[in-house]
Amino acid sequence: MNDEISPQALSLPPEAATSSTAPAAEPSPPPATTPANPPLGSGKSSFIPWLIVTLLALGLAGWQWMETRNRLDETQQEVARRLTENDAATSESRTLAKQAQEQLSALQGKLNELEGRLAESKSQQEVLGNLYQNLARSSEESILTEIEQGVTLASQQLQLAGNIQVAILALESADMRLADNGQPQFINLRKVLTHDLERLRALPQLDLPGMYLRLENVIDAIDTLPLALADRPRDESPITMPPEPPPLFSLEYWQALANDFWQELRGLVRIERIDRVEPPMLPPGQNFFLRENLKLRLLNARLALFARDQVTYRNELRQTQAWIERYFDGKGKSVQNSLQALEQLATTEISTELPNLNESLSAIKRFRAEKEQR
């Protein structure tokens, strides 16, 4: 910022300026007399401009020095402030670096812990994989066992009891078990089960439980069926309370005694109207054996129903129906209901050729053999 002032920039006396700029004139002749000392006024006037220039230069230098001093102070303060900020930033950076180091150490510890857990998880995953394979094998074996039991039950119901509905339910349960499992290796086995199930559904359905219950109702009603000729005549007179006995050996007493004797005497002879040509005459007390024989015939018909023996089943029902028509009162409501039930049961066809389930059982055996080979 120091500015140099050249002597050319300063103003010169007019004389000097004139002497310096004017062209050289011809030399004049020297004066006649030359004083020994110059005059005082001319030397003082030449000193003042130099003094002013010096003072201005000193003032300018002082102002420049003060300005430089102020700027240096400001620069020092700015440097000091920035050094302070740098120290604070450095301290904060050290703190952050220390915290980052601590976090890095903590993360490294967690990473080591996670690596250990990962290794443990891998070992557990291998163990679980082995367990899953074992469970899959055991589950497949369990499903196969359930299917085999269901098909065996259906086959037994068909061959022993002829119960088509129970066989259908057993095969449907086995097919639903395979459908819920959804494994592809059971597709062929399910096709065979579906084929056998369709064959059973195409058979005529017999309501064996309903027929069984109807036979049971007829058997239970045998003991209450009224006979065509009872051992004693039916007293159709209304039941009344007996009167109070009269005093002993009075007239009323003897009249009541005579009336009872006459009633007993009238009971020795019985006259009934019979609409049949040859009414069955049972010995006294034989109605018990008649009813028991009817029950035995109905039990034989029930066994024939389960065995699908059409001939025995129909013969037993027809014989029972004939006995009831012969020995029991056809006007009774219970007799009519029993005869109607027997007629409907006798006309039902029970001898249906039932298919076997050997195809499904063979498919299960083949699947088990292929599984053991794998």
Image (tube, grey):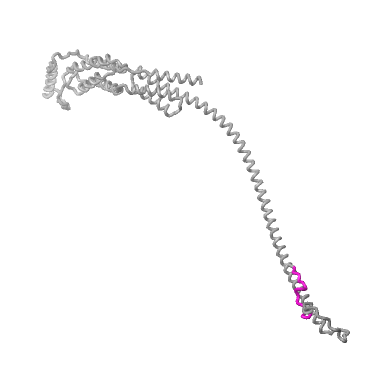
Query: Relative to 129, is 186 on the left or the right?
Result: left
Q: Nearer the viewer, residue 2 or 9?
A: 9
Q: Residue 80, position in %: x, y?
A: 71, 60
Residues in magenta? 2-15
Query: Is residue 324 rendered magenta in the image?
Result: no
Quarter of the N terminus within the rendering: bottom right
Prevailing secondary structure class for the magenta stretch in the rendered image: loop
Residue furthest out toward the front: 26
In the rendered picture of this protein, how many numbered marks are placed on residues? 0
In the figure, residue 129 lies in which quadrant? top right
Coordinates of residue 368 in the picture (x, y in percent) = 47, 20
Residue 72 figure quarter = bottom right
Residue 180 seen from this side: yes
The residue drawn where x is 35% and y is 23% is: 198
Please name the residue shown 87% across and 87% down the image.
Answer: 32
Q: Is residue 265 visible?
A: no
**Image coords of residue 243 (percent x, y):** 15, 27
- With 18 as the anchor, is 136 left or right in this view? left
Q: Residue at x 12, y 16 (%)?
A: 269
Residue 5: in magenta span: yes
In-front residue for pair 276/32: 32
As drawn, the residue found furthest toward the right would be: 36
Where residue 12 sits, quadrant-wise, is: bottom right
Q: Return the x and y of residue 311 as percentages of the image width and height.
A: 27, 14
Q: Nearer the viewer, residue 42 or 245?
A: 42
Q: Is residue 249 left or right of residue 177?
A: left
Q: Residue furthest bottom?
A: 32
